[in-house]
Image (cartoon, rainbow, N blue to C red):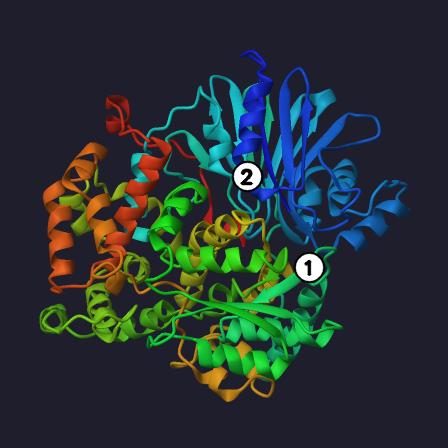
Amino acid sequence: MCGIAGYSHIRRPQEHADLERSLASIAHRGPDQQGVFHSGSLSMGARRLRVIDIECGDQPFSSFDGDLTLVFNGEIFNHCELRAELESAGYTFRSHCDTEVVLHAFRHWGNAAFKRLRGMFAAALWIRSERRLVLARDRMGIKPLYYCQQDGEIYFGSEMKCILAHPVIDRRLCLDGLNCYLSLNYVPGPFTMIEGIFKLMPGHLLEWRSGNAEIQSYLPPHITEAPPNSLDEAAEELDGLMRQSVTEQLVSDAPLGLWLSGGLDSSTILHYASQVSAKPLETFSITFNGRSFNDGDYIHQVSRNYGSKHTELDLNGDCDLVGAIQDISYHADEPNADAGAVPIWFLSKMTRQHVTVSLSGEGADELFAGYLTHKADRYAAAARRVPAWMRKAALACAMRLPVSDDKIGFEYKLKRFLEGTLLSPEYAHIFWNGTFSEREKESLYHYASPQPLAGIVAGMNSGRGLERFLRFDQSYYLPDDILSKVDRMSMAHAVEVRPPFLDPRIVDFAARLPQRFKLRGSTSKLVLRHLMRDKLPNSVLTRPKIGLDIPIHDWFRGPLCGFLLDTLSEDAVNETGVFAWPAVEQIIGKHLRREANYGYHLWGLVTLLTWMKRWNVLAPDADQQSEQCEVFPYEMASSL
């Protein structure tokens, strides 16, 4: 696992210090080794966290003739079988690391090599004889990759701070990215929060020659295979796939453990890992002792069942929450209003004291319909048969309910659900997991516009029922919120996190499944529960989904209240140049007076302003205010 960075210098002077600053900004991702490559047209480098072939896998990696050079971030879990295939084709290797396999795979298959890679990665390859740069990102977006084109040059890196390290790059807000952020709680690709910097979308590659870039999906056309005939048949197939994926992802030359929440997904990973591992696994957890959403009992039960060596941290108001939030504003690159970043920060910090690599359960909810929003999508279809005036009346009554200090209390869910039934199915799906509605943004955000979000939501118009919502979640929510959060928080502490559920074979399997094998009535992730019914405790199989985040409604009225008021002061809000102070003041007041729970809304604003201050991000200039961000076209389904 590593961090990569690079830039071209065809029209501007080559400055070695620029690359050094870029790599220094991501030293946390790879504390074990730094290497650089310089040519007359392009410079790039890598920071390495040694996980596979610790002695011989240092980067950059170049071909024997020096024509091809690679910097690489990630792990390729089928590198051994690819190595054997390449050796039979005549290639020789000087190491046992997966990075060299990627190098020779590209030499042999060209751009078609990327669809053969089973793993998580971001790669940059420079072909000297063609003066061609190729950037590529893994299918599901587990590993990040940013780029910027300016004045005929290209800048790229694993984190946005690699690009911001270059003095020529402006730091101005992207209005469209912010527009989406206020609704979604994250910035959907290809947008970022900085004008002119973009995310390379999952499953895509970028080819750059002499100032010109082309972006395309490297995935083959989707081939429809016959779905399983029964739930038993589906569970049997998933059983084999889970064994293969977990077995491959347990391979590491560095100490390895597992993040355990006591829920279905992480407990499933622990079950399969325990069957393969020759020794007890180390597991790590965050608890919230004394709170209704504490997972401790489930965690301890599963840990005991599998005999894991368990370590946990109780996260409460006595922890250095403000210090963590300040640190997160540096490592998060761009604001992510997912309050789960805080416990993941503390979890990663604790994990690094024991191991370098950890398996986790990310991806199962997006593949098998595990979120409450997926049930809400179903329930809302029935609710919309009720006249709108009756739903509005029900919402007016719900607004009178007293607010709860729970993370997501009954009254909060009821109000959000009823509000969502008054929206289209597409906008309701993102509203239930987001914060500000389009109407609310009009009074809050000076540059509110329905256009940016409409372009993202349009991808949900194709497909039927549940599948269109799952495709959206896999295309945006998973890479731009869940995986982004996990990557930044874990790599801030030099921990490599591997999600076995996102093995391409499991992703393809989930795509073939009938909807009834994913969500049936109120039972989510049906095929996974069916598979694990005789393997995990019944309490784990039947428990409600809680999610790992903080009780932000409560903490903004308690231990984080001072931080909230300091961060969202009138001067600070006005200084952004994009928000209306009266609207912000009203939201704060209603929350503190317990008239409504606006904790997640306020968390998004706090995260944003903390990030803007930390990175000295400027308000938009006059030209920006009259133009939208330019983005490359992207077909939502192309990465799946």
Horizontally, residue 126 falls left or right of residue 342, namely right
Q: Which of label 1 and label 2 is nearer to you?
A: 1
Front position in the image: 475 or 186: 186
Name the side, left or right, on which 108 lies relative to 149. Answer: right
Quadrant of the image occupied by residue 104 = top right
Q: Which of 295 and 7 is in front in this view?
A: 295
Q: Name the residue under label 2.
A: 158
Give the vertical position of 300 relative to 182 (above or below). below
Which residue corresponds to the image point at 62% horizontal and 46% vertical from the top-left?
121
On screen, residue 372 versus residue 121, left or right, reads left
Query: Foreground residue, 590 or 395?
Result: 590
Residue 551 spot, x, y in % from top left: 31, 65
Q: Residue at x 54, y 12 (%)?
A: 12
Decide: few, some or many residues near mark 2? Use Cα within 10 Å; few <14, some 14-19, many ≥20: many
Q: Which residue is drawn at 76% across and 42% down?
A: 57
Is 622 displayed left or right of 475 in the figure?
A: left
Q: How many marks?
A: 2
In the displayed structure, would residue 474 be above or below residue 215?
A: below
Residue 577 placement (x, y as % from top left): 20, 32
Q: Characterize the local packing of mark 1: few (<14), some (14-19) or many (20 or more) Cα atoms within 10 angstroms.
A: some
Q: In which quarter of the image is the C terminus?
A: bottom right
Name the residue beneath numbered marker 1.
Answer: 255
Q: What residue type is labelled 2?
A: Ser
Circle 1: element type: loop
